[in-house]
Amino acid sequence: MTIDISGLSAKELRSLIAQAEKQQSKVLSRPKATAMRAKINKYVKDHGYTIEELYGASVIVPSETAKKRGDRRPAKSTGSKIAPKYRNPAGRGQTWSGRGRQPRWIAELVASGKSLNDFLIK
């Protein structure tokens, strides 16, 4: 973040410095986010609730494994599983939901003149 202070007067600079020092003091004196998160989680648990109950399922709470290894990334959402819509007639284990990029096997069959409808799972 860059602040252009070249056009400020001495009075404005003193005011800005005072505001910055006040903000710095506030930031340095507050508890760390991890400590605060732990206090909140303990309070919620002590009262018989879960974070998901209070804030909904969209809140990402780091897993125990992520905590142990110090991972600060949120857990990936698994999303919902989509039923396959197409099946490769040659390899029964190869399926495609119809979403995203076409698998190589279906792209090759379509390029050879076949229709997607030929591979629909009935």
Image (cartoon, rainbow, N blue to C red):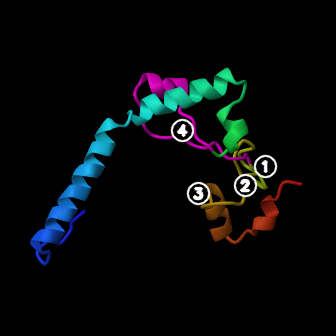
Relative horizontal placement of residue 35, taking residue 23 as reference (left or right): right
Label 3 vs label 1, nearer the camera? 1
Q: Where is residue 44 in the image (x, y as percent from the top left)?
A: 64, 28
The kind of residue on which mark 3 rests is Arg
Inter-mark Cα distance, 4 to 1: 24 Å
Q: Are marks 4 and 2 in contact (CB under 8 Å)?
A: no
**7 or 109: nearer the eye?**
7
The residue that disc 2 covers is 97
Element carrying mark 3: helix
Classify mark 1: residues with Cα within 10 Å, few (<14), some (14-19) or many (20+).
few
Inter-mark Cα distance, 3 to 4: 30 Å
Q: Residue at x 72, y 41 (%)?
A: 93
21 relative to 8, above or below: above
Q: Are marks 1 and 2 in contact (CB under 8 Å)?
A: yes
The residue that disc 1 covers is 83
Identify the image quadrant of residue 46.
Answer: top right
Residue range in magenta is 59-81
Is residue 69 within the magenta segment?
yes
Element carrying mark 1: loop
Which callout, 3 or 1, points at the residue further toward the start of the chain? 1
Q: Where is residue 54 in the image (x, y as percent from the top left)?
A: 70, 39
Which callout, 3 or 2, points at the residue further toward the start of the chain? 2
The residue that disc 3 covers is 104
Inter-mark Cα distance, 4 to 2: 24 Å
Classify mark 2: residues with Cα within 10 Å, few (<14), some (14-19) or many (20+).
some
